[in-house]
Image (cartoon, helix red, strand yellow):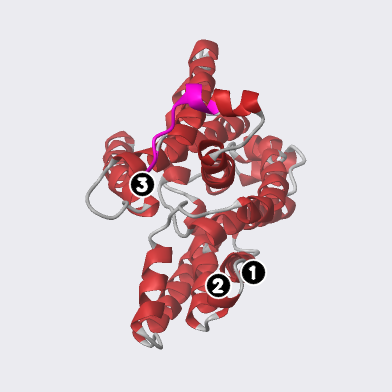
Amino acid sequence: MTVAPRPAHHLFALIAILLVALFAISLLIGAVWLSPVELIHEVLEKQPQLGLLIVTELRLPRTILACLVGAALGLSGAALQGLTRNPLAEPGLLGVTAGAALGAVIAIYFGMATQYVIAAPFMGLIGGLLASALTFALGSGGGAIALVLAGAAVSSLAAACISVALNLAPNPYAAYEIMTWLMGSLADRSWTHVWMVLPFVVAGGAMLVATGRGLDGLSLGEMQAQSLGTDLGRLRISCILGTALAVGAATSVTGAIGFIGLVAPHLVRPFVGHQPSRVLLPAAVVGALLLLAADIATRLLHFGPEMKLGVLTSLIGTPFFFWLVVKIKRTAP
């Protein structure tokens, strides 16, 4: 069940330091580059000026959201890989991401997003929860394989509905808004989005962390896990509901962002051993680090308009996905 972890205390200390450094950098870079000295001067004067307002009202909520969303994706990816015992599992596996995307698209399609700021995030959250409920209803009682198949079916249904919305968009502006949202971004997010996401990510994350012992037992097989006292039904519900809350809320405000949930657990697993419970929290930290770094990169890369976050994570994550498939193929018996 376990593999002796390599000494990794120094590595994780370095990751924590790097996360703090990227957090600070994220507050300083953008269309307007800010000087730390000038910001400190503004704080000491206790008279907020343009620089401090840019940090507190624009970049700080964006940075916090990047950490929250990245942590939610990394943690849920680690939990789902443990639940399904599938190294290619990630949050979109259960249809949560596609469901949240569909909910936000509905809000944009019917014009609700133009009237209410939180309409798209709220509808996205509802969509993610409904998608996870449908996945569980279809896959319950059939084990991990049934859940994966049910998630694929729900994702396909949501993707088809999104395509219909794009095809029948009432005007070019609505189609453009839908396409822009689907590409994923943290730009123009505010404290309203942070406070909306925070309780769901915390609640969902707590549920996922609590599954660690059950996932450890499940790594031995379903029969062995049950003999150790693991309630497999409760374990699946906790993983699905925790993912729905954390990832559904995250996707509802950022749009679809892929590969973070797949990559983060694999980056930490060699250093903590293959015991699922040991992967959960480190994967959350690395997920936050990866997404924050990607968001900073979108502001540094200039190809005309700012590159969308979901596009960049896909460009970076796809080669990793191919490498992982090849690695699994080589090590398969």
Q: Whole-percent x and y of residue 307?
A: 31, 51
Mark 3 closeness class: few <14, some 14–19, many ≥20 residues within 10 Å: many
CA gap, disc 2 and disc 3: 22 Å
Sequence-first disc among 1 and 2 = 2
Distance between mark 1 and mark 3 Cα atoms: 25 Å
Res 269 visible? no
Q: Which mark is residue 126?
A: 1
Q: Which residue is rendered at x = 66% and y = 48% of the image?
A: 201
Q: Check contact, mark 1 vs mark 2: CB within 8 A.
A: yes
Image coordinates of residue 221 in percent, x first then y, are 59, 42
Is label 3 in a helix, a strand or a loop? helix
Residue furthest right in the image? 229
- The secondary structure making up most of the magenta span is loop
Mark 1 or 3, nearer chain start = 1
What residue did someone put label 3 on? 313
For residue 24, above or below residue 207: above
Q: Is residue 10 magenta?
A: no
Query: Which residue was labeled with disc 2?
Result: 103
The amino acid marked with disc number 3 is Thr
